[in-house]
Amino acid sequence: MHRICSALAFVGLVMGQTAWLTAEEAGSPVVYDAPESSIVPAYRYVGEAAVGKVAFYSEYGAQNDEPRQYRGDRDSWLDNLEVITEYSTFFPITLRSADEPEKFELAVELARRAYRKKQLLSFSAYGTEGVDKLSRVLDRLETLPEGKHVIRNTFACMLGDEPYLAGRSPEQVEQLIGCFDRKIQSRYPHIQSWINFAVSTRDVRTWGTGEDGLKRLPQGLDIVSIDWYAYLGNGTHNNWGHRDFRVVERQILDTVLPTFLDEQTQRLQQAIAAAYQPGEEPMMILLGTSSYVWDITHPTPVSVQDAYFEYVKKSPWAGLMWWIFEDFKDCIGGRHHEIIRSHQRHGQRIRAEGLY
């Protein structure tokens, strides 16, 4: 696993650490040399090993605490798990609001239920506070009868979303990765660090090699994912995009996807090659995001979703994650019957064709 543990990262970790459990309360941590009982035979698919695979397939936003969240209650989150785990290979759990006791216990419950449904797990826990929250969840799982099995099937933690658009530097992201390495990965080497970046038709030059005046990828990452918005336009009425979304759907299929996906895949591979030695490259997961046209965020049409799926299958991307499962903010969410049926069909193909 990658390691970045600078002195600055260590100081920041110690000063910002929350003592969730004492060493006596947590007991000696168990370090797992290799994952066991996983639905996916290997945790890492990089480069050619990822071609022909869609090993990591799931939804983003299975639990959301946005103020305008439409279905942000415990029962809906449990219901979401039932729907998603019918076709996904991993289930993401959000810890960003796990301070409240009931939210913390619900995160633990979701992890245990997802494990029973033979899901790999990922956690979304942003920043150093998120790392502390994940550590607390893992400490809690250590005390439960099946908790060690749940931990073995946890493959990653998403540490942040669009850090460069939020004004973070590569060095700041590397400090966060160092915090994760020291606090989580030193105990559980199989749990991988994950950062999501923004690349879209509106902002295709967020990052680069570092030598072209653009921000480089941070070193030490195990997984890198990218948001790809399948739209024409930036949401303003005076810019690209047709008012009839059926026209936009056709434009996406005919003009955007045939070139945009290849171009951005190549840019990411160039950025990885500039920052990583061969054999140390991070795994690539694509976020197939919604379509923002004329101030309305639409679910990605089934035709476009199928195109994304086929592209990931034949490319170095190891997985595909859909944004977003539930309605929130100004979105028309992805929880529609035709969308769910599409994802069920993809999940059946993953298992029938051995794509994992």
Image: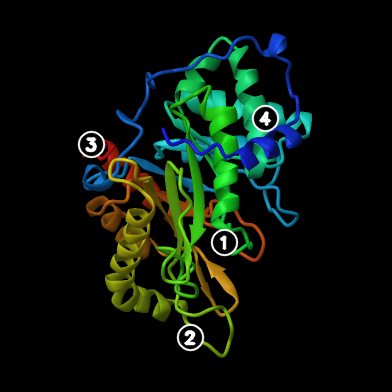
Q: Is residue 181 above or below residue 152?
A: below
Which sits earlier in the primary sequence, circle 4 or circle 3?
4
Residue type, numbered disc 1: Tyr
| Residue 84 locus on image (x, y percent) | 48, 40
Query: In this rendering, does residue 94 appear at all?
Result: no
**Furthest-bottom residue in this view:** 238
At 49% from the left and 80% from the top, the residue drawn is 233
Residue type, numbered disc 3: Gly
Q: Foreground residue, 261 or 65?
A: 261
Pick the quarter of the image with the N terminus.
Answer: top left
3D distance between C-alphas at marks 4 and 3:
32 Å
Disc 1 designates what residue? 164
Disc 4 designates what residue? 106
Residue type, numbered disc 4: Leu
| Residue 242 locus on image (x, y percent) | 47, 85
Element assignment for label 1: loop
Element assignment for label 2: loop
Query: In this rendering, does residue 273 appear at all?
Result: yes
Disc 3 designates what residue? 354
Disc 2 designates what residue? 240
Q: Is residue 7 above or below residue 66?
A: above
Q: Are marks 3 and 2 in contact (CB under 8 Å)?
A: no
